[in-house]
Amino acid sequence: MAAEGSGTAGSQALMRGLDVIEAVASGATTLNLLSAELGLTRSTAHRLATSLVKRGYLAFAPRAGYRLGAKLLQLGYLAQSQTDMLQAARPHLEALSLLTGDAVHFGIRDGDRALYLDKMAGQRRITISSRIGERQPLSSTGLGKALMLDHDEAYWRERLAEETNQGSATTDPDAWVERMHGYVRAGYAFDLEENEDQIRCVAAPVRDVSGRIVGAISVSSAAQYMNDERMQSLGREVTQAARAISADLGWSSPAVECEDAA
């Protein structure tokens, strides 16, 4: 019961902190205004506001009072950039889903996980368990591997070892790294039923104007529809769609042909 109470208290503190941010955004710039608007004592309002200042969500000046902090500007910029990417990606995802008949995903790297931001369900009567907003391992998903194609081998091995320890990945490290090198040469990656039984996936990276990988797209389907020949063919189609999204984000695609993935 103690753990449950602690969780409830933590949720209440989080909600109160968000209330403080929203109140400052609405013009409550002093402790008196904050405590009055939120129905808090001055000491509670001060404690919450001070914590938010320390984390950068609020800023404080002696005569001006509280204002929104630099952390919120940073998060707003990131949210805007993700929205821009989704807007650029959506028509290409829809076209790829219609072309293949399969489920299509778009995601980004969120720390050391793949975060799914969009999904087209496809036309086949297949259940793909992925959900928008969920975070999946990098080493066992096609999307995650595509997001790692520019990283070095040390990072690959680190992620595989960590996710193996967490039970998210089970594979021979050397064979997996060899496949990753093949994916780098090809420009796209496979999930060979590593993340979900009987589900295979082909994924390719999305790049911004600087050439940096900022996202990835994937096509997923049941293994019965994903033999080796079709996966190689899909590799080219997924890569073309990823390059089209990248071009919309300002990336200039080099005129090179993709190799087949190993």
Image (cartoon, helix red, strand yellow):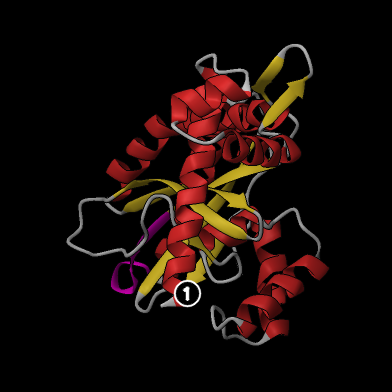
Q: Is residue 209 magenta?
A: no
User: Would you name the residue on which mark 1 appears?
Assistant: 3
What residue is shown at x 42% (from left), y 71% (from top)? 4
The residue positioned farthest toward the left in the image shown:
125
Residue 157 at what x, y percent from top left? 75, 74
What is the quadrant of residue 169 in the picture? Answer: bottom right
Of the pair 163 and 125, the residue shown nearer to us: 163
Q: Magenta region: which residues? A: 219-226
Q: Which amino acid type corresponds to the residue marked 1 in the rendered image?
A: Ala
Of the pair 248 and 161, the residue shown nearer to us: 161
The answer to whether 214 appears left or right of 140 in the picture is: right
Residue 124 at what x, y percent from top left? 20, 58
Whether residue 108 is situated above or below residue 229 in the rendered picture: above
Whether residue 142 is situated above or below residue 159 in the rendered picture: above
The answer to whether residue 84 shows anywhere in this view is: no
What is the quadrant of residue 250 in the picture? Answer: top right
Q: Is residue 225 magenta?
A: yes
The answer to whether residue 109 shows anywhere in this view is: yes
Whether residue 191 is situated above or below residue 237 in the rendered picture: below
Residue 146 at what x, y percent from top left? 60, 56
The answer to whether 146 appears left or right of 126 in the picture is: right
What residue is shown at x 55% (from left), y 18% (from top)? 28
